[in-house]
Image (tube, rainbow, N blue to C red):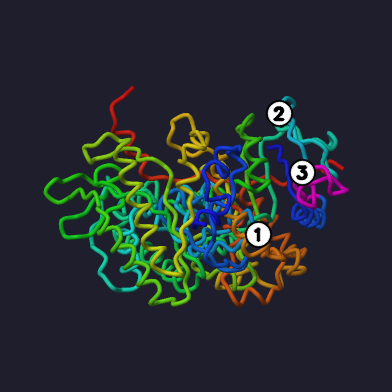
């Protein structure tokens, strides 16, 4: 007798993977905690997090949009202006340190820098440079509308039951005064200044500490908040590390994956969902990528999300009543998906980092 | 000037006001009316634009020598009458704080979803005829948007239509309260927002003033 005798089928490569069609691979995730159908769920992080929002809405779950666009506006227009993309208009948050920065600003633990970029007569928010395609009309509007987003982020933390965060990058750009940009200045706005702007390829300790601090901050304001971590399976579009982009991608994703495991293993209120593994595992033969071998195709997204919901139902059973049919007074108990949010299903995913591709060599 | 009125039930109210005028004071306007969201009498079939003929087909109610189809080339001026997304409603839809560009884009998108926009586009695609547009401008109470928002939105909506070669005709001043809201007594009922005969007559006069049409002596029916 040895412990391997009692390992279930899913623990053996041959039975779980090699002898199955990739689409019959199951039990990839054993959820730690139940997510009731009506529980408000917020999503932030790298662009892959947007697939979560869409899938939750399609399943009639309660994706909480704390900063909704007017309901009469189309998805296309709303998404162009950063609405219906994440639960607040933060735009992509690629690193845990950037998440921590947003949270500190939202809860008044840190001052928001006064930096605003100007392009002609328009003004760009350095911390979400592509949230408005043509920028804002004044620096004051940049600040005022960012404050609106910070209020929405506060709402997300204090009212949500589950905070989904998708870790995307380790490579990051900081101002020498210590604050972080989501994009390298000069790529999506502003101008690059080597004396002011610092490249940091974050290491395990830095990523880990930032994520722990972000979660601790959120739990201070909402002790019942559960956190679901994922790692974006989308490779880097460009690296400033000096490494080959493939090596830099594996380095970055491996580190983020390790941090996600470390944090989820340390807390019973933090879980990790393996979207990264599902898309990237060799057993799936790269079939979930578009021809550019970077973008995840709809089949991959669907498989990932089906794995998510199947695992949830296998462990906790299907919820009997869809959110849209629940009693009206349930609305008082939890923030409900906005009308605009429920219309968002088919909007494209927004990835600001793709602007970097424009700076590569032609051909 | 040959004038064509195209509209929904609110155009019907306008026609009622026209008919209430002494015959020698009635403008000789053709009317094409499709209540129920610009659909046929049964409410099933939408009014069709035939781009080959350059005409809108099959109005369930009309007053015209030429039948139920409005042929665009026959007219020097169109008056489009409707109630979809009145300014007060748009002000309410866009009440939240947002950037100038998003507000402009959202307002344009909302205006473009109206049936009247499609009528205007179809007319503009083949004709340089003057196009006036009238729709209910102000709500009857301040619940949906504050008065400043209504005034601001009205200016934005007018600018949107002007950008598409359409003149937005202001709601008659006498139907408005000093705060810019629609007077309750100007409406038959709050449910359908139809003007009373008196208010419709004022609306008709406002349109005539805008057009500066000479008094007509002929009725096509």
Instruction: Determine if the magenta segment contains residue B42.
Output: yes
Q: Return the chain for callout 3.
A: B
Give the quadrant of the C terminus of chain A: top left
Provide residue A22's location: percent of width, then percent of height: 58, 39
B14 and B148: which is toward the camera: B148
Above or below: residue B91 compared with residue A109:
above
> Mark 2 or mark 3: which is in front?
2
Badge 1 marks a residue whose secondary structure is loop
The residue sitting at 73% across, 45% down in the picture is B5
Provide residue B112's location: percent of width, then percent of height: 60, 46
The residue that disc 2 covers is: B51
B6 and A297: which is toward the camera: A297
Q: From this viewpoint, which residue is outermost toward the top?
A: A363
The span picked out in magenta is B24-46
Looking at the image, tell me whether mark 1 or mark 2 is earlier in sequence order.
Answer: 2
Above or below: residue A190 compared with residue A316:
above
Q: Return the chain for callout 1.
A: B
Q: Give the Cα distance between marks 1 and 2.
A: 29 Å
Residue A104, image quadrant: bottom left
The residue sitting at 29% across, 40% down in the picture is A248
Q: Give the Cα distance between marks 2 and 3.
A: 26 Å
A361 and B32: which is toward the camera: A361
User: Are tags 3 and 1 found on a single chain?
Assistant: yes
The residue sitting at 28% across, 33% down in the picture is A359
The residue that disc 1 covers is: B136
The residue that disc 3 covers is: B28
Badge 3 marks a residue whose secondary structure is loop
Provide residue A237's location: percent of width, then percent of height: 35, 38
Looking at the image, tell me whether mark 3 or mark 1 is earlier in sequence order.
Answer: 3
Badge 2 marks a residue whose secondary structure is loop
């Amino acid at each position: 007798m040895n412990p391997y005798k009692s390992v279930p089928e899913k623990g053996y490569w041959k039975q779980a993977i090699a002898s199955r069609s990739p689409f019959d691979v199951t039990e990839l995730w054993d959820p730690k905690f139940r997510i009731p159908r009506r529980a408000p769920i917020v999503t932030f992080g790298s662009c892959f997090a947007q697939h979560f929002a869409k899938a939750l809405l399609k399943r009639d779950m309660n994706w909480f949009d704390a900063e909704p666009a007017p309901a009469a506006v189309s998805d296309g227009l709303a998404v162009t202006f950063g609405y219906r993309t994440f639960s607040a208009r933060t735009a992509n948050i690629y690193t845990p340190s950037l998440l921590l920065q947003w949270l500190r600003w939202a809860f008044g633990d840190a001052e928001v820098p006064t930096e605003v970029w100007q392009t002609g007569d328009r003004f760009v928010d350095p911390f979400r440079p592509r949230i408005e395609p043509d920028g804002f009309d004044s620096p004051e509007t940049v600040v005022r509308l960012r404050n609106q987003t910070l209020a929405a982020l506060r709402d997300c933390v204090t009212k949500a039951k589950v905070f989904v965060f998708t870790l995307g990058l380790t490579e990051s750009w900081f101002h020498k005064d210590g604050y972080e940009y989501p994009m390298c200045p000069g790529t999506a706005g502003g101008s690059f200044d080597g004396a002011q702007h610092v490249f940091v390829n974050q290491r395990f300790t830095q990523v880990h500490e930032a994520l722990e601090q972000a979660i601790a901050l959120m739990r201070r304001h909402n002790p019942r908040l559960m956190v679901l971590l994922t790692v974006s399976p989308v490779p880097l579009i460009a690296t400033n590390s000096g490494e080959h982009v493939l090596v830099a991608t594996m380095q970055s994703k491996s580190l983020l994956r390790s941090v996600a495991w470390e944090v989820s293993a340390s807390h019973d209120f933090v879980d990790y969902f393996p979207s990264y593994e599902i898309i990237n595992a060799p057993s799936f033969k790269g079939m979930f990528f578009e021809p550019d071998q970077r973008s995840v195709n709809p089949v991959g997204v669907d498989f990932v999300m089906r794995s998510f919901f199947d695992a949830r139902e296998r462990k906790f059973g299907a919820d009997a009543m869809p959110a849209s049919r629940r009693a009206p007074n349930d609305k008082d108990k939890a923030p409900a998906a906005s009308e605009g949010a429920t219309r968002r299903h088919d909007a494209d995913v927004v990835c600001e980092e793709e602007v970097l591709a424009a700076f590569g060599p032609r051909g | 000037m040959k004038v064509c009125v195209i509209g929904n039930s609110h155009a019907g109210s306008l026609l009622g006001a026209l008919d209430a005028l002494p015959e020698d004071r009635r403008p000789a306007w053709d009317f094409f009316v499709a209540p129920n969201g610009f659909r046929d009498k049964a409410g099933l079939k939408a009014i069709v634009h035939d781009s080959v003929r350059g005409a809108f087909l099959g109005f369930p109610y009309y007053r015209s020598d030429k039948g139920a189809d409005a042929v665009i080339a026959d007219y020097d001026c169109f008056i489009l009458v409707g109630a979809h997304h009145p300014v007060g409603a748009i002000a309410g839809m866009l009440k939240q704080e947002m950037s100038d560009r998003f507000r402009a884009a959202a307002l344009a998108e909302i205006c473009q979803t109206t049936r009247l926009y499609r009528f205007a586009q179809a007319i503009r695609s083949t004709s340089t005829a003057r196009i006036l547009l009238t729709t209910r401008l102000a709500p009857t109470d301040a619940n949906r948007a504050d008065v400043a928002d209504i005034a601001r939105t009205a200016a934005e909506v007018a600018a949107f239509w002007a950008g598409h070669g359409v003149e937005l005709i202001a709601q008659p001043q006498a139907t408005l309260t000093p705060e810019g809201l629609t007077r309750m007594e100007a409406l038959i009922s709050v449910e359908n927002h139809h003007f009373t005969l008196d208010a419709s007559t004022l609306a008709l006069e406002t349109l005539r003033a805008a057009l500066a049409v000479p008094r007509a002596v002929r009725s096509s029916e």
